[in-house]
Structure formats: C-alpha cells, structure tokens
Amino acid sequence: MSAIRQSHKPRRIFAPFLQNCQAARPLLLFPLALCFAMLALMKASPKQAPRKLNPATELVGSIAARLDRPVVLVGLMGSGKTAIGRCAAKQLGIGFEDSDQLIVKTAGISIAEIFELAGEVKFREMERKTLRNLALTSPQIIATGGGAFCQDATADLLLQHTLTIWLKAEPATLLSRIGNTKTRPLLGNGDPLATLTRLNEQRARLYKKAHIHVDTDGLSTHRAMMALFHALDTHLPRQ
Ligand code: S3P
C-alpha cells in the first residue's frame, strides 16, 4: 500500500506544475511564433549587397601594400614635392620627410644662409648625407631639394635604393606655386622665370632618369596626388 502511495507521489508533485504549464502555454508560444516570423521575414528580404569600398580607398590600400621602399620626389622648385608628398603620405598612412627641412634642422640656419655662409658645394654634401640616411629606411615619402637628383652620386644612390618620381611642370606654373622667391637662393638674381626656364632646360635630362614621371602642370595638389597614385599603381608589380 505504501508502495502504491509512493508511486503517486511524483504525480502529486508535478500535477500543479503541469497545470501551470498548460495555463502558460499561450505565453510560451508567443515568443516562439515571433522568432519564426522574424526568421521568415529575414529569409524573404533581399540580401544586403556587401558594402563597396571607395575606389580611391582601394587604390591607396593596394599601393600601400605593394610599397617596399621609400618613394622619393624629385623635380624643380615649385613642382609640389613637399605639398603633394605630404598629402600622399597622409593618405597612404606612411611617414613623410623633406630633406631640405632636415638639413635646416641639423644646421640650425636656413638654406639661404647655408648657401651664403658655407657655399653650394657644402650644401650638396649635407644633402647627399641626409638622403643617404633616408634612402635606407622603410616605405615613406621623401621630398628632395630641386638640385639633389642632379648630383650624380645622390641620383645613383636614390635610383638604387628608392622609387624615384619626377614631378614635372612648366616654368610659369612653378613660379606661380613658389610665391616668395627669396627663400630660394638660386632664384635671387632678379628674373626667377628666366632662371627656372634655364634650370628646366639644363636639368630635364637628369630628372628623366627617375623611375616614374608625373606631369602636374595645371593640377591642384589633390589632383596631382591622384595622378601620382595612378602612376604608382601602374608601376608597382601586382602581388
Ligand atoms: C634647390 C632647390 C631648393 C633648395 C635649394 C636648391 C635647387 O629646394 O634645395 O634652394 O638647386 O633647385 P626646393 O626644390 O624644395 O625649392
């Protein structure tokens, strides 16, 4: 008898619970039905297209991934080596250096003062040493002084260890970009346009040795930077 009573014990315990469950069934079914409805909706709605990258972002990312050495900008005064180089480095997420600015920082006096006090030969020596140190670094953008690439030893060094880019522009464009010619010792002779025209004729054959040529004439800094990116994209091997 006690055994029979014992076998009814669980039923007595669970009976109220089961009754409660039955009462709560609609409450339990509602969230379940909601889940099914949401799943059905998700299936029915068209799949979202993967977000497309901005083509410029894609280009910049691809170039940054393929650079294995510093990019050195060469060309006449006013060709945009510093302005374009700084913007391009920012976009690529790499460093930027300006050889003239480093020389000024080391010497503690301006380029014009170095020319005046120590002479151009001494300046070229400082320029070569500065660029030798920069050439052996990881990918970054380096703006050079306009005459740096016209010194054979410096040009050989840069051609061997870096990717050199000649930023071209017409003398009148160069002059309009330079503004204050007093900071350029070579333009202090009273006729800067004539000097730039002469330097352009003398130096073009040397700048031509650069690995890449980019014509920046008539282009804003941003457009010139994009022209530089397209030239780099064409030049760098695909991985
Ligand atoms: C020079 C260009 C200058 C500067 C120096 C000599 C040149 O640099 O290095 O006045 O020989 O063309 P920017 O090209 O940056 O003006």
Image (cartoon, helix red, strand yellow):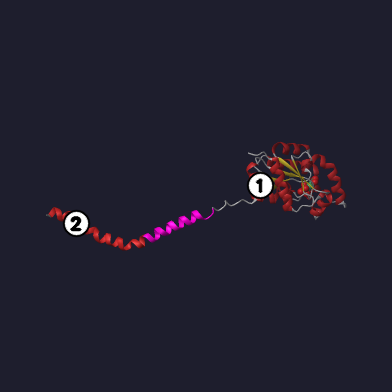
Q: Identify the amino acid type marked 1.
A: Leu
Tell me if the residue at label 2 has its CB under 8 Å from ligand 1. Answer: no
Mark yes or no: residue 92 visible: yes
Residue lying at 32% horizontally and 62% vertically, measured from the top left: 24
For the N terminus, give its image quadrant.
bottom left
Residue 114 makes an appearance in the image: no
Residue 9 tag number: 2
Kindly indicate the quadrant of the structure image that contains residue 21: bottom left
Asked whether residue 31 is drawn in magenta, I would say yes
Neighbour class for label 2 at 10 Å: few (<14), some, many (≥20)?
few
Residue that mark 1 sits on: 59
SS at circle 1: helix
Q: Depth check: 14 or 178 in front?
A: 14
Left/right of residue 66 with respect to residue 125 in the rendered view: left
Measuring 69% from the left and 46% from the top, which residue is drawn there? 141
Q: Residues within 10 Å of mark 1 (few under 14, many from 20)?
A: some
The location of residue 236, given as percent across then percent down, is: 68, 40
The C terminus sits in image quarter? top right
How far from the left and from the top, in percent, is residue 152? 78, 37
Horizontally, residue 203 falls left or right of residue 86, namely right
Residue 163 is situated, as x and y percent measured from the top left of the image, at 71, 40
Residue under the image location 83 percent in, 45 percent down: 200
Instruction: Give the label, 1 or 2, closer to the camera.
Output: 2
Numbered range of the magenta stretch:
29-46
Image position, residue 226 (x, y; %)? 71, 49
Q: CA–CA distance between discs 1 and 2?
A: 76 Å
Mark 1 vs 2, N-terminal side: 2
